[in-house]
């Protein structure tokens, strides 16, 4: 298991702990929290099942998952790079803010920027991609702030709550992310000189 910790201004990304299992089970029992997740229609998950999933994540080298904590230590979700393809240098991005009190306040966006930065700089990925349901507008806003660009649409790909929904595809390339990072640093220096 990795002991990696990544600190930002609002969040700390840390390894998952078996102590997190209870919070995950609580979050996963709330349909509002899971409405955008692939596990939306699954039966309630037990503590035992969640602890086993966390144990498996320790051993799974193709998935890199970290808990999201606030700076003051409150666990609010998880962020991941999964299906890591070492040959093609790509991975799928995923994020989940389970604590609704922290929705829409930039915690997920910062966590996303931190793990994407890690993926490009440390894992040497070339491309990071994601999939989301078309009606996940809050997620879309965050993904754009991280730097993801729209790449396509799978029409009526997901059946949920009696309706067909489009699945949207987004991606970001290493060069795009590093260019955006350089531009942001340049803008900060310019603002500081004024």
Image (tube, grey):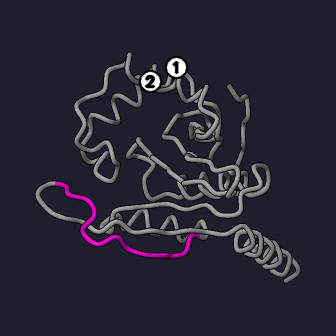
- Between 158 and 43, which is closer to the camera in this rendering? 158
The residue at 45%/47% (across/down) is 96
Question: Eyeballing the image, is 117 above or below 137?
Answer: above
Q: Secondary structure at mark 2?
A: helix
Q: Are marks 2 and 1 in contact (CB under 8 Å)?
A: yes
Q: Secondary structure at mark 1?
A: helix
Q: Quadrant of residue 24?
A: top left
- Region of the chain picked out in magenta, as a range: 148-160
Could you tell me what secondary structure mostly forms the magenta stretch?
Answer: strand
For the C terminus, the quadrant is: bottom right
Q: Which residue is mark 1?
A: 18
Residue 191 spot, x, y in % from top left: 80, 79
For the N terminus, the quadrant is: top right
Q: Residues within 10 Å of mark 1 (few under 14, many from 20)?
A: some
Q: Which residue is mark 2?
A: 21
Residue 160 numbered tag: none
Please indicate whether residue 150 sits to the left or right of residue 47 in the image.
right
Residue 99 spot, x, y in % from top left: 41, 41
Q: Quadrant of residue 126?
A: bottom right
- Between 9 and 158, which is closer to the camera in this rendering? 158
Q: Is residue 158 within the magenta segment?
A: yes
The residue at 39%/69% (across/down) is 168
Q: Is residue 168 within the magenta segment?
A: no
Please indicate whether residue 194 sits to the left or right of residue 30 in the image.
right
The residue at 64%/57% (across/down) is 90
């Amino acid at each position: 298991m990795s002991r990696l910790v990544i600190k930002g201004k609002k969040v700390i990304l840390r390894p998952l702990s078996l102590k997190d299992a209870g919070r995950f089970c609580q979050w996963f029992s709330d349909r509002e929290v899971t409405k955008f997740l692939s596990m939306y229609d699954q039966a309630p998950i037990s503590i035992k099942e969640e602890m086993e999933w966390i144990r498996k994540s320790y051993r799974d080298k193709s998935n890199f998952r970290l808990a999201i904590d606030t700076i003051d230590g409150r666990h609010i979700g998880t962020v991941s790079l999964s299906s890591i393809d070492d040959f093609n240098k790509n991975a799928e991005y995923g994020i989940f803010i389970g604590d609704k009190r922290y929705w829409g306040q930039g915690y997920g966006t910062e966590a996303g920027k931190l793990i994407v930065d890690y993926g490009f700089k440390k894992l040497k990925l070339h491309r990071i991609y994601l999939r989301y349901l078309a009606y996940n507008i809050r997620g879309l806003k965050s993904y754009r702030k991280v730097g993801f660009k729209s790449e396509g649409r799978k029409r009526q790909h997901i059946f949920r709550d009696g309706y067909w929904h489009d699945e949207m595809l987004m991606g970001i390339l290493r060069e795009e992310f590093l260019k955006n990072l350089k531009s942001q640093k340049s803008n900060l220096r310019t603002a500081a000189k004024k």
